[in-house]
Image (cartoon, grey):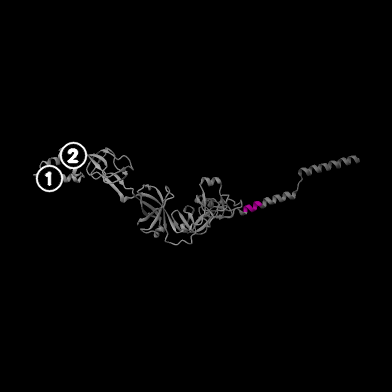
Amino acid sequence: MNKNTLYICTATLVGLLFGWLIFGGNPTKNNETDLTKIHDHAQESTEKMWTCSMHPQIMQSEPGDCPLCGMDLTPVISGGEGLTANEIKMTKNAMALANIQTSIVENLVIDDAHMISLSGKIKINEEENAIQASYFDGRIERLNINFKGQKVKKGQLLATIYSPNLVAAQQELISAATLKTTQSELYEAVRNKLKLWKLSQKQINTIEASGKVRENFPVFATVDGTVSEKLVAEGDYIKQGQPIVKVSNLNSVWADFNAYENQISEFKKGQKIRVITNAYPNKVFDAMVLFIDPILNTQTRTVVVRANLKNKEGLFKPGMFVTGKIKSNSSITNAKLRIPASAVLWTGERSVVYIKTHHDEPIFEMQEITLGDRHGEFYMVVSGLQAGDEIVTNGTFTVDAAAQLQGKKSMMNQ
């Protein structure tokens, strides 16, 4: 009897032990874990905000429709990863696809602070252009100008032309020469007609003396220069006065610079300007302002400031890009920094840039700044930035779009 009781008690204890191992545990810990999950989820739900992809200024604490366009609101991406409220982080892949580039803001060099930098291009001096035209009708039998850029000299044969009218005029001269003693007025009239067609005295005398009609007549260059435009081809029929070639004298050229509307007051005729080229970066060429365009280009909001450059050595080629440095008459002592114009987003009332807030990571934050004058492709900065700040200089719109989609402070969302 005692043995049976002992067996029963032992079996009961073993069963309880197995039951505790299988179904047991710490209910308090489980409850705490569940409560923690519930608490975290509740906190997440209270912190989540909802915005409209078309109107990022709309921010609501619960889902619904946009009050402006009626679109469904979307959840704002959580600002975790240690970011502040207005910082955004972009992936390296997005940075590469958008070609986002940054640069360091530096202090202005004192000499540059009082100089205006202008971008320009070398152009042909139109005052030195000459048009070589035909002075009689005819067909071009031979054209001695083969390509644009060819050098020509005064007196050089440009073309040979067959002219039926000139053939008839020669026959008139030969006939009038036999009557010059009795009909001198007719004789002189025929000779003058040939002179108007730019035949020389020697050519006219040769026709009269030989008594033979010349079918083809030469056209000679009247100036030295370089062919800038070939206007006809061999075999073409041309009219009296029609241009054959355009010849330019490149011993002097123009440097045309684009000056912005707010810089017009800085320039005047006769002002000294220093010209620098990419082809000769170690050389500085001195010139003077020759012309300021009285008409503003309404598309670029610029005027042309022109300087005349001597070019006897042929260093300047038409089409070459140049930079002009001209001393500013205005005081810009308040502006100590200069940034590329591509870095600035301008809303009409505000000027903003994006600063890279972490040196090693693509994290950006919008910053409002106060701009000074614009000088070429750069803006002077009065306030809002410091030397050493790293700002976005290419792809600024892409960064701003990312900020808008995340409901962060942006150009359109203050």
User: Percent x, y for residue 339?
Assistant: 49, 55
Q: Amino acid at mark 1?
A: Leu
Q: How many marks?
A: 2
Residue at point 40% right, 59% down? Answer: 266
- Where is residue 243, by image quadrant? top left
Front-lying residue, 379 or 403 = 379
| Element at label 2 | helix
Query: How many residues crowd mark 1 within 10 Å: few (<14), some (14–19), many (20+)?
Result: some
In this rendering, position of residue 67 left or right of residue 42: left
Which secondary structure, mark 1? helix
Task: Give the residues drawn in magenta, as a range.
Answer: 40-45
CA distance separating discs 1 and 2: 18 Å
Q: Is residue 38 left or right of residue 195?
A: right
* Image x and y of residue 400, in percent: 52, 52
**Residue sitting at 16 percent across and 42 percent down?**
205
Q: Nearer the viewer, residue 212 or 346?
A: 212
Q: Amino acid at mark 2?
A: Val
Q: Residue furthest left?
A: 182
Q: Residue 183: x percent and y percent? A: 9, 45
Residue linked to disc 2: 167
Q: Which residue is mark 1?
A: 186
